[in-house]
């Protein structure tokens, strides 16, 4: 059943009637524009109405069948994209709503962007049309068995042979085996492979190469190429639809022009030439994908909260001591204090993701004009926001599972699979700890430059206000004072800066900078988190300050923004107190205000998740059904399990019957 379909009984109608805002306009605020709502709606319904895209049986499929099902869906999606002449925007949305991780994600999400970002115009002309028409399938082969985070430590070699004008790709050790790339195991014909470039006997470090892996005739691995899947992964269904792979090269030769040569080149004679650009541009594809991962965090968290809010509104437990109907669990203050901050976070991540997309586009234009000044800002924001939003989302999905009680643990709730599919986001595209340490290093550098009068820019500009922020006192006197965006912004800025400065001072006391960074790395993580949370809060405040049409929409977003900010104050109160940014009393007032905000949010909760405009197909959850008619659906779903195919289970004759007979004999003794 789909959102708002005709002829349904809406068990959540009462909840929808209490909304104090125009849901249709909130859909626009969430999606970004009326056009975005319409096109997403069209694509979601197209997928939901196509039986090939059915996914309710996914967690019951053995891996081989699941993988074949993924191939079938990908091929069918492509067929529909071509038949319907979908635009790039429509095609991306269609793939999103198919909602099954597979090789196409890496083909479009990493292989194509790597060639676009690191290939010369000539290379793009040659390879992109093949990729766009799916005449080749590509993946992104960077991580190895021995090294993932430490990219400079990769071991695969690409040694130039001037005699044949070729590179020789080789995996010299077991640990140099490529390990993890999605789509590599079974589907890809090509890969962008990252390897150490060796020419004229010198190692020039990591570079990208386009390598054909499989025959375009019969898909068998090419000579010298060993390929396979790395095995089953966490959870049922989930990321097991993806063929994460292993790859080894035994002296495989590729033409010289398959080195991605936009940033550096090797001449026919074997001379290495590096263009006058920062080396870090090699990491450009990762920066691009980290930015998309932030947008995806809001999608995953909004799905989980949509399920938990709708279910909490229909689920009833206990009741007043005086008798009468049982209480909707959503009315319990504890349920609200666990769930509403997650709902607010989903909105916060949506808006910061929107801003990050803008930043990424802006930086890309600057890079094209050879202005590299904002590269560090792009790295810090994408790395930090990727880390903070994915960690909070993974934790949030698990919390939503618990918020749904026992039924949340059933696969049919959709939450176990959502969690299992989502949780590797904390690891891929950069382990979150490793990424936060990158942010912290940049913050430490910025603090050290303050003394020389260098003014920080972009999201670090607030650090330039060091004199004021190091000594300012929070002016909050009443709970309502916490509704002031200026007050919120100031305490978040003061907390982030004071933590950074304190940490920098502690590092300076260490025998060396390196030792200090090493010893204080747990503190550095917290410094980075404080800075990134400031960015999220600031971008939410800025969003709410914009013109937002629709009755009550702005008010709801303001509430959500305040919930997000004050929830963080409550959660990290230790930071705010220990840095002297506020008093314990002000902390208590923040919590008091938070309780009031939850009460204001309560009548709007179901409508706020309706604004995500998700179909029941995309949600994939019996508990999150739009109509709230959960119990019959749960009951029906149970009977679909293959274990219920027969009333007497397989194995009864061999293992249950003899046992039961033996007990019978014993009892007769
Ligand atoms: C699939 C896509 C489709 C849709 C997306 C949606 C969902 C995703 C779905 C599935 C996931 C599928 C695929 C997953 C793919 C992968 O995981 S690919 C592999 C990703 N690997 C990593 O992320 C590795 C993490 N490691 C690194 O990034 C780096 O090695 C490092 C940790 C940053 C350290 O690098 P290095 O040792 O070289 O650097 P430092 O010495 O620490 O720093 C040197 C200077 O460079 C600056 N720097 C570092 N990185 C960047 C960057 N990316 N951009 C710009 N600048 C960078 C750093 O700040 C230092 O600067 P300096 O101090 O001024 O010298
Ligand atoms: C589902 C999935 C899909 C993937 N897809 C791809 C793909 O398509 N292509 C590809 O190339 N790769 C892919 N990867 C690999 C992924 O990018 C790496 O796993 C990731 O970058 C983490 O690296 P690692 O595995 O080496 O972790 P490690 O670095 O070994 O991390 C292990 C632990 O060490 C800690 N640690 C590491 N370094 C430091 C440090 N300097 N300071 C403090 N702590 C540290 C980490 O925090 C972590 O706790 C994928 C991974 C997964 C799980």
Image (cartoon, helix red, strand yellow):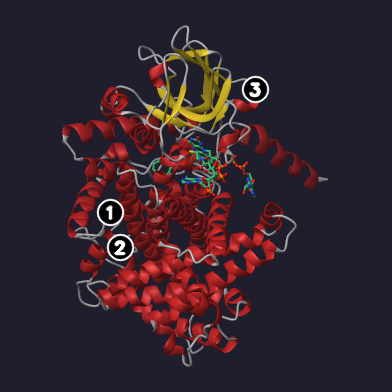
What is the C-alpha distance between the residues marked 1 and 2?
Answer: 8 Å
Is residue 645 among what the camera can see? no
SS class of the residue under badge 3?
loop
Identify the residue shown where x is 68% and y is 59%.
Answer: 520
Q: First in sequence, mark 3 or 2: give its number.
A: 3
**Residue placed at 33% from the left, 41% from the top?**
54
The residues bearing labels 3 and 2 have C-alpha atoms spaced at a distance of: 57 Å
Disc 1 vs disc 3: Cβ atoms closer than 8 Å?
no
- Say which quadrant the C terminus sits in: top right
Quadrant position of ligand 2? top right
Secondary element at tag 1: loop
Disc with the residue nearer the chain's start (1 vs 2): 1
| Towards the viewer: 269 or 405 | 269
Q: Which residue is mark 3?
A: 173
Q: Please give left or right for residue 366 compared with residue 150 in the image.
A: left
Residue mark closest to the camera, 3 vs 2: 3
Q: Is residue 495 above or below residue 378?
A: below
Q: CA distance from mark 1 to mark 3?
A: 53 Å
- Report x, y in % for residue 640: 42, 44
Mark 2 residue element: loop
Location of residue 187 in the rendering, given as x and y in whole percent from the top left corner:
41, 25
Q: Mark 1: few, some, or many residues within 10 Å (few <14, many ≥20)?
A: some
Residue 280 shows in the view: yes
Lower sequence index among marks 1 and 3? 1
- Pointer 1: what residue? 1
Query: Based on the displayed image, in which of its 4 quarters is residue 122 positioned?
Result: top left
Q: Residues within 10 Å of mark 2 (few under 14, many from 20)?
A: many
> Is the Cβ of the residue at disc 1 closer than 8 Å to that at disc 2?
yes
Q: Is residue 117 above or below residue 415?
A: above
Can you identify the residue that label 2 sits on?
Answer: 627
The answer to whether the residue bearing label 1 lies less than 8 angstroms from the nearest atom of ligand 1 is no
């Amino acid at each position: 059943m789909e959102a708002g379909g005709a002829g349904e009984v809406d068990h959540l109608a009462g909840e929808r009637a209490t909304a104090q805002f125009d849901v249709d306009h909130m859909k626009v605020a969430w999606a970004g524009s009326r056009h975005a709502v319409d096109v997403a709606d069209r694509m979601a319904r197209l997928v939901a109405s196509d039986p090939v895209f059915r996914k309710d049986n996914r967690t019951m499929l053995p891996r081989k069948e699941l993988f074949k099902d993924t191939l079938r869906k990908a091929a069918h999606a492509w067929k529909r994209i071509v038949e319907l002449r979908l635009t790039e925007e429509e095609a991306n949305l269609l793939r999103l709503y198919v909602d099954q991780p597979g090789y196409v994600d890496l083909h479009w999400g990493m292989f194509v962007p790597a060639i676009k970002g690191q290939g010369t115009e000539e290379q793009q002309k040659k390879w992109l049309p093949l990729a766009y028409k799916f005449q080749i399938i590509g993946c992104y082969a960077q991580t190895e068995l021995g090294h993932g985070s430490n990219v400079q430590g990769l071991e695969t070699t690409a040694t130039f042979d001037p005699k044949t004008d070729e590179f020789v790709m080789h995996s010299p050790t077991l640990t140099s085996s490529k390990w993890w790339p999605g789509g590599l195991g079974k589907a890809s014909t090509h890969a962008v492979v990252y390897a150490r470039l060796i020419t004229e006997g010198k190692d020039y470090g990591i570079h990208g190469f386009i390598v054909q892996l499989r025959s375009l005739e019969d898909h068998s691995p090419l000579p010298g190429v060993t390929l396979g899947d790395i095995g089953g992964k966490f959870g049922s269904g989930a990321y097991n639809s993806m063929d994460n792979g292993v790859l080894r090269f035994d002296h495989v030769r590729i033409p010289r022009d398959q080195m991605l040569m936009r940033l550096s080149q090797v001449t026919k004679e074997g001379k290495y030439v590096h263009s006058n650009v920062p080396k870090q541009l090699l990491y450009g594809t990762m920066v691009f994908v980290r930015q998309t991962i932030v947008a995806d965090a809001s999608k995953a968290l909004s799905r989980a909260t949509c399920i938990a809010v709708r279910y909490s509104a229909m689920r009833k437990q206990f009741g007043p001591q005086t008798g009468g109907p049982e209480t909707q669990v959503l009315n319990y203050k504890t349920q609200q204090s666990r769930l509403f901050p997650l709902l607010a976070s989903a909105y916060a991540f949506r808006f910061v993701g929107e801003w990050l997309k803008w930043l990424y586009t802006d930086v890309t234009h600057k890079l094209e004009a050879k202005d590299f000044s904002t590269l560090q800002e792009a790295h810090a924001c994408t790395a930090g926001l990727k880390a903070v939003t994915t960690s909070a989302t993974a934790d949030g999905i698990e919390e939503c599972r618990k918020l749904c009680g026992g039924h949340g643990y059933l696969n049919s709730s959709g939450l176990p699979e959502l969690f299992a599919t989502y949780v590797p986001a904390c690891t891929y595209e950069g382990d979150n700890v490793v990424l936060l340490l990158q942010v912290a290093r940049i913050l430490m550098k910025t603090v050290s430059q303050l003394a020389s009068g260098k003014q920080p820019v972009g999201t670090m500009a607030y650090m330039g206000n060091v004199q004021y922020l190091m000594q300012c006192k929070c002016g909050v006197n009443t709970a309502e004072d916490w509704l002031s965006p200026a007050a919120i912004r100031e305490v978040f800025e003061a907390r982030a800066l004071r933590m950074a400065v304190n940490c920098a001072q502690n590092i300076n006391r260490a025998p060396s900078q390196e030792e200090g960074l090493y010893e204080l790395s747990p503190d550095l993580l917290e410094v980075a988190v404080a800075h990134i949370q400031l960015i999220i809060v600031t971008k939410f405040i800025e969003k709410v300050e914009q013109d937002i049409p629709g009755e009550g929409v702005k008010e709801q977003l303001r509430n959500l923004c305040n919930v997000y900010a004050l929830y963080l104050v409550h959660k990290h109160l230790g930071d705010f107190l220990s840095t002297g940014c506020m008093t314990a009393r002000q902390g208590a007032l923040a919590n008091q205000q938070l309780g009031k905000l939850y009460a204001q949010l309560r009548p709007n909760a179901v409508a706020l998740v309706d604004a995500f405009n998700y179909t029941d197909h995309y949600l994939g959850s019996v508990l999150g059904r739009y109509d709230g008619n959960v119990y019959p659906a749960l009951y029906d779903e149970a009977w679909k399990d293959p274990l219920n195919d027969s009333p007497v289970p397989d194995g009864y004759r061999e293992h249950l019957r003899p046992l039961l007979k033996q007990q019978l004999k014993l009892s007769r003794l």
